[in-house]
């Protein structure tokens, strides 16, 4: 669990990034390629990008970058420099490549404690000029194949998210803005909470918290590991299935959408953890009665299990639902 402590003054300092951050998209897309989360939305992209990276001779580059950005409880903060979003890749990469040596040593050293170190980890940690140039070149090559071709969809998703947050802020202020990030985030009155791979928390202590949208953020929001850095919370944009047509019409998420319908496919994808009918409705922007009806159809098909917990009915995918979602 991640929890961020707020005071009333901290609420007034909230910032909402106007667009995605290129380096956050690089890091989180590298992690997304190492998992099968958000299969409905991202599997067609995964297949296409893996094939394009192989065709471009970037298999080794991908492996090196994924060692630097593992899908794990930690990756180096210097890869995602302070930004309010909307900046260019070159501007953010310049910050990455001029990271002070002391910080490089600290963060690369911590990364090496979590598993396989990246190639040339010692030279990178020392800020070796040639190693940093290779890192910059690798990021640019990867970005050109895995992120840049999809910028229009990424920007469209961010543009669609902005009025939702703006309406929440205008209607109910900062607390309403934070509440609009449910179910991924819960606002508890004086703290923000969300699921996280490790148990940690920090207080803002007068520093503004910047909320940054991300197309390739899956499952849960992400924060920087170092609590002394300018605080950010990167939140999922949750792209809809079908944003990228599947190149194989006989398999995968698109065929699932044709089988059970887009909304039910999205309900099924959401339910990798127990979720109430109300939370499903909030996540998909549908009426509670509609969410209940979709859950009932999925339950009757054996794809979802439902049980009452106090005043709520909680739903979760069954093994059969998991197999169908993942093409089994």
Image: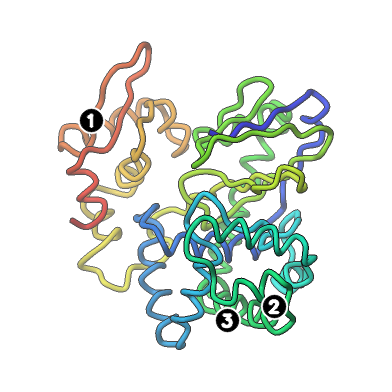
- The Cα–Cα distance between marks 1 and 2, rounded to whole angstroms, is 50 Å
Query: Are the two marked residues, 2 and 3, in contact with CB atoms closer than 8 angstroms?
Result: no
State the residue in front, 22 or 157: 22
Label 2 secondary element: helix
Please state, as top left, top right, bottom left or bottom right, where the C terminus lies in the image.
bottom left
Which-is-in-front pick, marks 1 and 2?
2
Query: Of circles 1 and 3, which is in front?
Result: 3
Q: Are marks 1 and 2 in contact (CB under 8 Å)?
A: no
Image point (56%, 66%), residue name: 68
Secondary element type, mark 1: strand
Q: Earlier in the sequence, mark 2 or mark 3?
A: 2
Q: Nearer the viewer, residue 149 or 124?
A: 124
Identified at 63% across, 72% down, the residue is 122
Crowd class of label 2 (few under 14; some 14 to 19; many from 20; radius 10 Å): some
How far apart in space, not on screen, are marks 1 and 3 (Cα)? 44 Å
Kindly identify which numbered label has been placed on residue 141.
3
In the image, residue 141 above or below residue 182: below
Tell me where residue 170 appears, x and y as whole percent.
Answer: 73, 32
Residue 232, above or below 6? below
Decide if residue 307 is on the left or right side of residue 92: left
Q: Quadrant of residue 233?
A: top right
- Residue marked by disc 2: 132
- The residue carrying pointer 1 sits among few (fewer than 14), some (14 to 19) or many (20 or more) residues within 10 Å by Cα, namely many
> In this figure, which residue is indicated by the disc labeled 1?
305
Where does the image place residue 283, in percent across and percent down from the top left? 46, 37
| Alpha carbon separation for disc pair 2 and 3 | 14 Å
Q: Quadrant of residue 157?
A: bottom right
Q: Is residue 3 left or right of residue 218?
A: right
Circle 3: element type: helix
The number of discs equals 3
Q: Earlier in the sequence, mark 1 or mark 3?
A: 3
């Amino acid at each position: 669990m991640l929890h961020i402590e707020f005071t009333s003054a901290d609420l007034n300092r909230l910032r909402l990034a106007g667009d995605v951050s290129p380096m956050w998209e690089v890091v989180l897309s590298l992690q997304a390629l190492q998992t099968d989360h958000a299969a409905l939305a991202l599997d067609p992209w995964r297949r296409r990008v893996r094939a394009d990276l192989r065709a471009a001779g970037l298999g080794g580059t991908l492996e090196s970058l994924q060692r630097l950005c593992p899908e794990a409880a930690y990756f180096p903060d210097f890869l995602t420099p302070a930004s309010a979003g909307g900046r260019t890749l070159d501007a953010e990469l310049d910050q990455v490549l001029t990271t002070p040596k002391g910080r490089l040593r600290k963060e690369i050293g911590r990364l090496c404690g979590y598993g396989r170190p990246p190639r040339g980890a010692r030279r990178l940690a020392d800020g070796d000029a040639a190693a940093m140039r290779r890192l910059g070149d690798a990021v640019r090559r990867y970005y050109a194949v895995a992120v840049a071709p999809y910028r229009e969809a990424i920007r469209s998703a961010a543009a669609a998210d902005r009025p939702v947050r703006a309406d929440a802020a205008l209607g109910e202020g900062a607390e309403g803005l934070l509440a609009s990030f449910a179910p991924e985030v819960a606002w508890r009155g004086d703290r923000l909470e969300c699921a996280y791979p490790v148990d940690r928390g920090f207080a803002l202590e007068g520093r503004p918290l910047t909320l940054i949208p991300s197309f390739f953020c899956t499952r849960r929001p992400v924060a920087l590991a170092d609590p002394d850095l300018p605080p950010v919370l990167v939140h999922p944009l949750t792209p809809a299935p079908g944003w990228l047509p599947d190149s194989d019409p006989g398999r995968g998420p698109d065929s699932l959408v044709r089988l059970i319908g887009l909304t039910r496919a999205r309900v099924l994808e959401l339910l990798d953890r127990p979720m109430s009918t109300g939370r499903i409705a909030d996540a998909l922007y549908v009426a509670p009665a509609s969410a209940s009806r979709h859950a009932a159809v999925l339950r009757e098909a054996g794809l979802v299990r439902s049980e009452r917990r106090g005043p709520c009915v909680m739903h979760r995918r069954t093994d059969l639902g998991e197999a169908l979602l993942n093409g089994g």
